[in-house]
């Protein structure tokens, strides 16, 4: 069975409040398409968190970037909305020096699916966002996006976690860091098939075990754990492509299972608080 680690640090109480100098949230619209049989051109919105001090006119200062996906029944505004307010946690992590300032983008798989959003991300979202904001991509060419993959991450909760595994399997060359929370890989029906699909993507990419990093989490009381994510993680342990440890200087896959967590953002925020500072160090 998957390893149970009970040493999650709870978010400090003050992390639920605003800091004196906060980052900013921008809502922007972009052009994309439906990626279905109709293949219609559409406009969609996404939200962008910019850390305090971000200067639109300063192109010399580069920022790592995280794309973070919501769950089922939610939308692009959920993560920075009143029920989650993840921006407070980001502000405090940066203010306390626990995490370098980064850009965090919350798109939506609505109007496509969690399993096909990687297409929209690759073709529409990354070029639009990283053409507008100062990231490590020198341009929005596919070559420069791939070259900057170690400064790009993708994560999500629930259906957003499913979206994250799908992105890993189909667009691994575009990002090095992944944070699927309380969601499993829907590209296959069996735990071993889910793990094998990820391995196939790694082998196809030609990347080494030091070129991708997975930080994934769930809770004992989360309905997605016992029959879905847990068996997949157990299957992944049989493959040498996944080196399980919280020390990402020697491994590339960190799975943590809290003994209390349910399928709710109140616990997901703890996971993000604990894992996000480990991004972009390797």
Image (cartoon, rainbow, N blue to C red):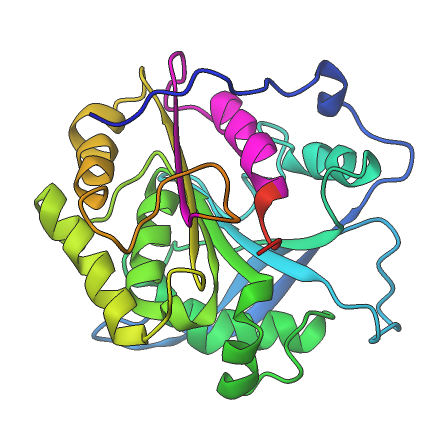
On screen, 165 above or below 254? below
Rendered-image quadrant of the C terminus: bottom right
On screen, 28 above or below 127? above
In this picture, residue 222 sits left or right of residue 215: left
Which residue appears at 58% of the width and 27% of the height? Answer: 83
Query: Residue 199 at what x, y percent from top left?
Result: 22, 60
| Residue farthest toward the front in the current orientation of the protein | 250
Asked if residue 167 can be seen in this view, the reply is: yes
Rendered-image quadrant of the N terminus: top left
Query: Residue 266 at what x, y percent from top left?
Result: 52, 21
Q: Nearer the viewer, residue 40 or 254?
A: 254
Q: Identify the magenta region.
A: 251-277
Query: Picture quarter containing residue 256?
Result: top left
Q: Nearer the viewer, residue 8 or 81?
A: 8
Which residue appears at 70% of the width and 53% of the height? Answer: 102
Which residue appears at 43% of the width and 59% of the height? Answer: 212
Query: Residue 150 at what x, y percent from top left?
Result: 55, 65
Q: Nearer the viewer, residue 265 or 253?
A: 253
On screen, 236 above or below 36? above
**Was residue 220 drawn as part of the magenta stretch in this picture?**
no
Query: Residue 182 at what x, y percent from top left?
Result: 35, 34
Query: Picture quarter containing residue 19?
Result: top right
**Was residue 261 drawn as part of the magenta stretch in this picture?**
yes
| Residue farthest toward the top in the current orientation of the protein | 260
């Amino acid at each position: 069975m998957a390893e149970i680690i009970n040493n999650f640090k709870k978010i400090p109480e003050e992390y639920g409040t605003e800091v004196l100098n906060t980052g900013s949230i921008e809502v922007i619209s972009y052009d994309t398409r439906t990626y279905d049989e109709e293949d219609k051109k559409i406009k969609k919105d996404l939200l962008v968190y910019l850390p305090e001090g971000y200067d639109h006119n300063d192109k010399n200062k580069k920022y790592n970037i995280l794309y973070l996906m919501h769950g089922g029944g939610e939308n692009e505004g959920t993560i920075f909305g009143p029920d989650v307010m993840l921006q407070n946690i980001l502000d405090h992590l940066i203010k306390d020096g626990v995490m370098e300032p980064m850009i965090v983008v919350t798109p939506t798989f609505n109007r496509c699916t969690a399993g096909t959003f990687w297409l929209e991300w690759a073709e529409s979202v990354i070029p639009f966002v990283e053409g507008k904001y100062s990231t490590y991509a020198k341009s929005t060419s596919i070559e420069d996006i791939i070259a900057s993959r170690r400064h790009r991450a993708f994560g999500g909760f629930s259906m957003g976690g499913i979206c994250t595994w799908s992105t890993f399997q189909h667009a691994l060359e575009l990002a090095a860091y992944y944070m699927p929370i309380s969601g499993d890989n829907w590209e296959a029906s069996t735990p071993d098939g889910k793990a094998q699909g990820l391995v196939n993507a790694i082998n196809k990419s030609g990347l080494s075990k030091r070129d991708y990093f997975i930080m994934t989490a769930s809770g004992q009381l989360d309905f997605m754990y016992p029959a879905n994510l847990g068996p997949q993680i157990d299957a992944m342990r049989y493959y040498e492509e996944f080196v399980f440890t919280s020390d990402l200087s020697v491994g590339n896959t960190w799975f943590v299972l809290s003994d209390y967590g349910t399928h709710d953002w109140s616990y997901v925020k703890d996971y993000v608080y604990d894992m996000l500072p480990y991004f972009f160090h390797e």
